[in-house]
Amino acid sequence: MANNDIQADEELDITDKVCPNTFVKAKVVIEELDEGQILAIRMNDGEPVQNVPRSLKDDGHKILQINDNQDGTYTVYVEKVGD
Amino acid sequence: MADEQQSLSAEKKSKSINYAVLKKGGFMRQKQKGYFSMRLSVVGGYMTSENIRTVSEVAEKYGHGYVHMTSRQGIEIPFIYVDDIEEVKNKLAEGGVKPGVCGPRVRTVTACQGSEVCPSGCIDTLKLARELSERYFGRELPHKFKFGVTGCANNCLKAEENDFGVKGGLYVSYNQPNCIGCGVCVKVCKAGALSIDENKVIHKDESKCTNCGKCVKVCPSDAWVGEGGYIISFAGTFGNTIFKGESYLPFVRDKETLFRVADATIQYFQDHAKRGERFRLTLEREGTEDFIKAVKEAYNG
């Protein structure tokens, strides 16, 4: 099921943000994308990785994959749904 | 001088006051003769703006212009003079505000905001609090008896402090086709019930699952689905004696069962407690064996 060949259209690093700005930043950036484009978001372990993917999904976007970078961060690949 | 006269007449009047009746109607006697702190019925911490306006007007006109927020989500209006009681009751009733209760009976049913408002909520706590209140509020018992309803394992409402605590949870199941193998559910499972294998498939150890539902809440791909249910804790008390309510039953998956268990619990307390004895002390005196048997029977229907 894992697919490491996902090509992101845009990258975002929110490891310097704290809740709720993690999600806010991700939301702002994904708004700028076109439907079907993929955003790769690097975020910290803990609260961000537990909350941000779910919140993006609740906004209607599709979470494709979450990679553990083995350095205390994760990269979440999310496909924009809707304009 | 006017104060003195009022105090004298209050003293005279207070001799003929039936305190038991007033207490039942939510009037708590104050240190100051002839004055009462009026407790209101607030189910699940819910008050409309109209209710609040009414309370404000009553506090302004009949009290000292302030209210006291109680530890169990209630409101009390202190300094209601004995002569004004009927008028205050009518005034409150016009604004849809009902009096609460004190003394040996079922008290205010408390609740957090629950699943209708809170993203963490697993059950509709307000609805359940209203149903419990409808069924039990004010019922006469050997001593006070408290219900509390909290929506999830975060336990904002402190379920285990209550004689009958309800905590929302989820009965969860795994829908593998939706799973993207991200493993976030494994990270969030405090019970250690989940693991992920080399094919990124999740495995669940049923015996460890506490029904907290966090896997469902956190899943970004709807691979976990959950149905709301209840974890019940019994005989908690947080006054003179401190005891955390204990759970003697498995996860309760439907409301009918919950009410059967609640009925059996109240009945047991009614039949076995001595006057003025909190539920926990009844169980300590009698042992928990018979009680557990009674609620298990109710649970099994």
Image (spheres, rainbow, N blue to C red):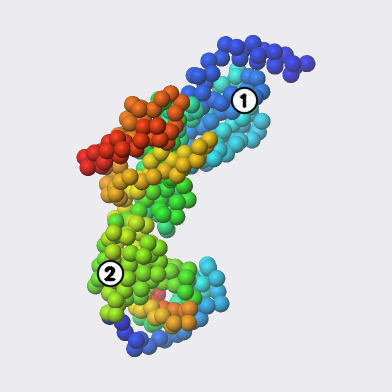
Whether residue A35 can be seen here: no
Give percent across and percent down for residue A62.
Answer: 35, 74
State left or right for residue A52 relative to residue B258. Answer: right
- The extreme left residue here reads B301
Q: Secondary structure at mark 1?
A: loop
Looking at the image, is mark 1 or mark 2 earlier in the sequence? 1
Measure how far apart labels 1 and 2 are at the Cα level.
59 Å
Quadrant, the N terminus of chain B: top right
Whether callout 1 and callout 2 share a subunit is answered yes
Nearest the viewer among B73 and B208 is B208
Give percent across and percent down for residue B7.
Answer: 70, 16
- Neighbours of disc 1 within 10 Å: few (<14), some (14-19), many (20+): some
Quadrant, the C terminus of chain B: top left
Give percent across and percent down for residue A33.
Answer: 43, 80
Residue B31's image quarter?
A: top right
Nearest the viewer among B89 and B101 is B101
Which residue carries the number 1 mark?
B30
Whether residue B192 can be seen here: yes
> Are discs 1 and 2 less than 8 Å apart at CB?
no
Q: Nearer the viewer, mark 1 or mark 2?
A: 2
Residue that appears at 45% across and 85% down: A10
Residue B208's image quarter?
A: bottom left
Q: Amino acid at mark 1?
A: Gln
Q: Measured along the vertical axis of the image, is residue B293 above or below residue B151? A: above
Q: Amino acid at mark 2?
A: His
Q: Chain of mark 2?
A: B
Residue that appears at 54% across and 25% down: B27
Residue that appears at 36% across and 69% down: B186
Nearest the viewer among A30 and B78 is B78
State left or right for residue B190 relative to residue B40. Answer: left
Disc number at residue B203? Answer: 2
Give percent across and percent down for residue B293.
Answer: 27, 38
